[in-house]
Amino acid sequence: MSPVILFGLLLVVSFGVLYQFLKPSRTEAAVQQRLAGIEPAGDIGDGTTILRQDRVSSNPWLDDLIRQLPGSLALLRLVQQAGKDWSVTSVFLLSLIGAVVGWWLASLAIPSVPLSALLGALIGLSPCLYLYVIREIRFRRFDTLLPEAVDLMARGLRAGHAATAVLEMVGNEVADPVGSEFRAMCEEQSLGLPLREAMLSLVQRVPRDDVRFLATAILLQKETGGNLAVILDKTAAVMRERARLRGQLMIYTAQGRITGWILCFAPFIMFGLISIVNREYEKVLFTTPTGLHMIYGGLVMMLLGVLIIRKIIDIKV
């Protein structure tokens, strides 16, 4: 192993060990997050805004630098929607380290430079893919708990509570992630943000159709009047009917989804098994121009097949 590569690996491991020992505890992190959430982003005296702005890094000059990078704000929104307290800087750094280490490990096993770079890029994108998966799991749990929260709001209104009181009740009594999102909305209202802006902020954090329905119902009732309890009852019924229809569609499209997963992973599993049995058998794919062209063509056709299957089974409810 090259001394430079060995030094780089030792440096990464050393920084990882130091980070584990020096990082704040869970309680300290929660306190810092709470303080960061209520402190203003600027000073009134110099003419800047007093509204809090989401930071991509705890370092001010690094925050301004990373904001200039394309996709930094979208990555910040992804981290928030996934319910993680990661910084965009740490995600970028982790992706960079993963891409470099993945490219180096792939270059040891695969002599083709483009394929090694492709594998390194895929490993570098793994933190973003992890966030996408966590966000989808969180959103599905949110969709499951939201009808219960809407029913609780309707019962609270019938009992004589105000709209802001029932929103706070949902934040305190319904499980996360619904409870945490409603608590954040109530905190924004307590700090002076109007109900409309707080609801739109909730829709931005949880961009789901059911949340849009709820926000539309509450804001329309606030502007035009009416019995909000009855509106919420009908909204909860629509949410449950949509959930039932989504479950039926999941059953009907199960075969297509299984086919897509098989098409995606079966070639790589077979490649790994054959490589374990006979390493020289598949070496010709990486050492000859024809083999490389077959790999590139197979990857492109596999990607097209997965996209076509996904388009077929992606039915909007």
Image (cartoon, helix red, strand yellow):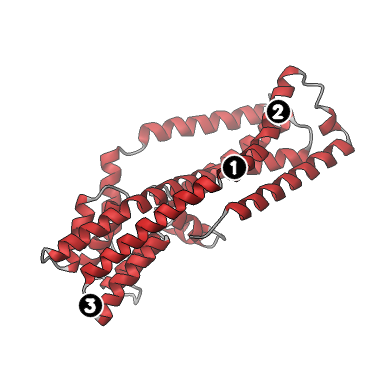
Identify the residue position indicated by label 1 in the image.
255
Give the spatial CA distance, label 1 vs label 3.
46 Å
First in sequence: mark 2 vs mark 1:
1
Taking the spot 36% from the left edge, 35% from the top edge, the residue there is 22
Vertical placement of 243 versus 200: above or below?
above
In the rendered image, residue 60, in percent from the top left (x then y), is placed at 41, 58
Front label number (1 vs 3): 1
Query: What residue do we see at 49% from left, 45% from top?
Result: 133
Camera-side mark, 3 or 2 = 3
Q: Is residue 313 above or below residue 159?
A: above
Question: Is label 2 or label 1 in front?
Answer: 1
Q: Position of residue 204 (x, y in %)?
A: 40, 63
Spatial CA distance of label 2 from label 1 is 21 Å
Of residues 54 and 247, which is closer to you in this image? 247
* Residue under numbered circle 3: 226
How far across and how far down the image is residue 175, in percent? 26, 47
Residue located 54% across and 45% down the image: 129
Disc 3 secondary structure class: loop
Type of the residue with mark 2 = Met
Name the mark on residue 270. 2
Task: Label 2, secondary structure: give it.
Answer: helix
Closer to the N terminus: mark 1 or mark 3?
A: 3
Q: CA distance from mark 3 to mark 2?
A: 62 Å
Give percent across and percent down for residue 134. 45, 45
Mark 1 lies on a secondary structure that is: helix
Q: Amino acid at mark 3?
A: Gly
Residue type, numbered disc 1: Gln
